[in-house]
């Protein structure tokens, strides 16, 4: 739908969503830049990408519980290396602000994992140009959502 897109940001959970979307995008538009995105509190893919192999990290639970773990699966990491250009992380505060922005501007409820791509885009970490953010998941605790909407 967006043939002029420069960059696509995709949440990294277990890798299936990111690798699936990236594989399709590579076939349709090989020049597009495609990045996995994670919360800083639990970013095994980013650590693995930087090291060049799957890494084990200290996992810190947070409201961004739809993505993040202690490590990545080796087979998923190998597939990701073929279709992704890298990875970025967002802070929990950046993600909370993105959850609020999506709710206020689009009247859509996104969980933290779903808002991480927008958080990265707004931070400027992914550069400039036309950036598409994959917003996936709306399972956020009601009390946490209320706190985000009133605090950020």
Image (tube, rainbow, N blue to C red):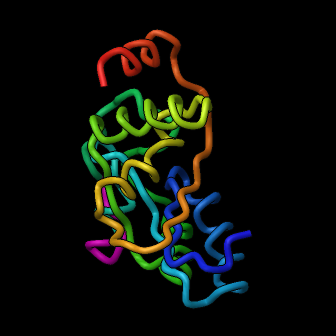
Q: In the visual, does 25 lie left or right of 149?
A: right
Q: Give whichever of 139, 121 is nearer the camera.
A: 121
Farthest bottom residue?
31
Q: In the visual, does 79 lie left or right of 48?
A: right
Q: In the visual, does 60 lie left or right of 6?
A: left
The N terminus, quarter of image: bottom right
Region of the chain picked out in magenta, as a range: 49-56
Q: Give whichever of 29, 69 is nearer the camera.
A: 29
In the rendered image, residue 54 lying in the magenta stretch gets the answer: yes
Q: Give whichever of 1, 77 is nearer the camera.
A: 1
Horizontal and vertical percent position of residue 33: 49, 79
For image coordinates 46% across by 63% down, the residue present is 36
Farthest front residue?
105
The number of discs equals: 0
Res. 100 image quadrant? top left
Res. 139 image quadrant? top right
Residue 70, above or below 30: above
For image coordinates 45% across by 9% down, the residue present is 143
Horizontal and vertical percent position of residue 146: 44, 13
Residue 4, above or below 69: below
For image coordinates 53% across by 23% down, the residue present is 140
Magenta stretch: dominant SS?
loop
In the rendered image, residue 12 lying in the magenta stretch gets the answer: no
Horizontal and vertical percent position of residue 121: 39, 58
């Amino acid at each position: 739908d967006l043939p002029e897109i420069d960059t696509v940001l995709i949440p990294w959970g277990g890798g299936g969503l990111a690798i699936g979307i990236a594989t399709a995008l590579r076939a349709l538009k090989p020049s597009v830049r495609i990045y996995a995105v994670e919360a800083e509190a639990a970013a095994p893919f980013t650590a693995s990408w930087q090291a060049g192999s799957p890494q084990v990290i200290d996992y810190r639970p947070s409201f961004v519980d739809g993505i993040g773990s202690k490590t990545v699966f080796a087979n998923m990491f190998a597939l990701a290396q073929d279709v992704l250009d890298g990875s970025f992380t967002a802070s929990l505060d950046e993600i909370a602000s993105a959850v609020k922005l999506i709710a206020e501007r689009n009247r859509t409820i996104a969980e933290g994992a779903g808002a991480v791509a927008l958080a990265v885009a707004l931070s400027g970490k992914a550069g400039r140009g036309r950036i598409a953010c994959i917003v996936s998941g709306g399972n956020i605790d009601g009390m946490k959502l209320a706190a985000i909407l009133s605090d950020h």
